[in-house]
Amino acid sequence: MIPFVSRIDSAEQAVWINQLSAAMPDEVILPFSALTLEQKQQCDVAIVANPNPDDLLALPSLKWVHSVWAGVERMINEQVSPTFSIVRLVDPTLSKTMSEAVLAWTLFLHRDMPAYAKQQSEGLWCPRPMVEAKNRRLGVLGLGELGRMSALRLVQNGFTVRGWSRQPKQIEGIECFSGEAGLIHLLQQTDILICLLPLTTLTKGLLNQKRLSSLPVGASIINFARGAIVDDKALLTLLDQGHLSHAVLDVFMQEPLPLEHSYWGHKSVTVLPHISAPTHPVSASQIVASNIQHYRLTDCIPSAVDPMRGY
């Protein structure tokens, strides 16, 4: 018996439980609310999606939890010295979906779609000079599974791509940087910046006034990571000043984005409702099932998150 522990609504929980049950016919998957006190005492593994930390504390035998989402920073922040391991979702389907979104919105900026939309609203017929993909400098922040596949997809489409991560990495076809000096160097050579970093204590507020100002005049930014990585005030200031030309934002400090927020009506901001890489319940359930089945056979917990790093 495996509990599904979550704060998502009951209808969405039912979708996940049905998919997980189909992928693990030998297991009984129950919502946390349906567990008896005796069952809570026996659970050694749980499947989670934004779980209430108090619910996890009510499972004293818990050895590990498997998130059905790739991002687990909220769970890490809410857990005070957890006694169990946290395993996040690593789904190739999710990486492919993200790389598709990165390519789509990079092309949106590369081919001047915001400018053409403005021209249409003004009734202007005015072709703009076209920059070849090889001459458009792209910078990808974060070279984990999502960042690596996204960067490679951009390379496959002819762009010049540089990448940055906290630890040095090597990826064929991509010039990689690391550390603070490497970050500034990358920013100074970037026309379109794509943020795919995990949210940690080290990346919170990383893209502040100083670092965003390191981008060349006319550069643009895509944030598909977490809202807290970007300083909203600094971004709006640089957009208003014309230093940055456009921002495509899919993640925010508060979601849904409040209606009174300046981003909604800003002429140089595209607001997306956190849709760049939604988790697919079918593929995710198969991965969770495989990891749990391997655990049942070997007693080995899959590779877990490092709470100190946050990923």
Image: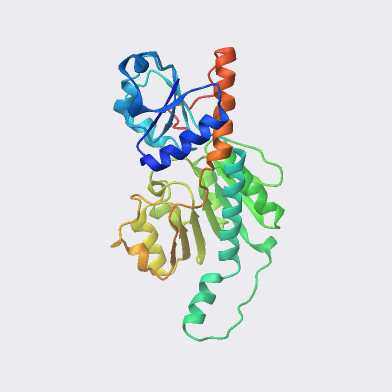
Q: Residue at 64%, 52% (x, y): give it.
A: 161
Q: Is residue 37 left or right of residue 12?
A: left
Residue drawn at (35%, 26%) of the image: 34
306 sits left or right of 150 in the view? left
The coloring applied to the image is: rainbow
- Residue depicted at 48% across the width and 56% down the height: 214
**Looking at the picture, how far across and down is residue 138, in whole percent?**
60, 56
Above or below 120: residue 241: above
The reply to whether residue 256 is in sight is yes
Which corner quadrant holds the N terminus?
Answer: top left
Residue 307 makes an appearance in the image: no
Tell me which corner region of the image, top left, top right, bottom left or bottom right, holds residue 164: top right
Residue 306 screen position, x and y as percent: 47, 26
Say which quarter of the image contains residue 235: bottom left
From the viewer's perspective, tell me whether residue 90 is left or right of residue 198. right
Q: How far across and how far down the image is residue 240, in percent? A: 38, 68
Along the line of sight, the residue nearer the viewer: 307 or 207 = 307
**Left or right: 192 in relation to 2:** right
Count the marks. 0
Residue placed most toward the observer, 11 or 4: 11
In percent of width and height, residue 219 lies at 52, 63
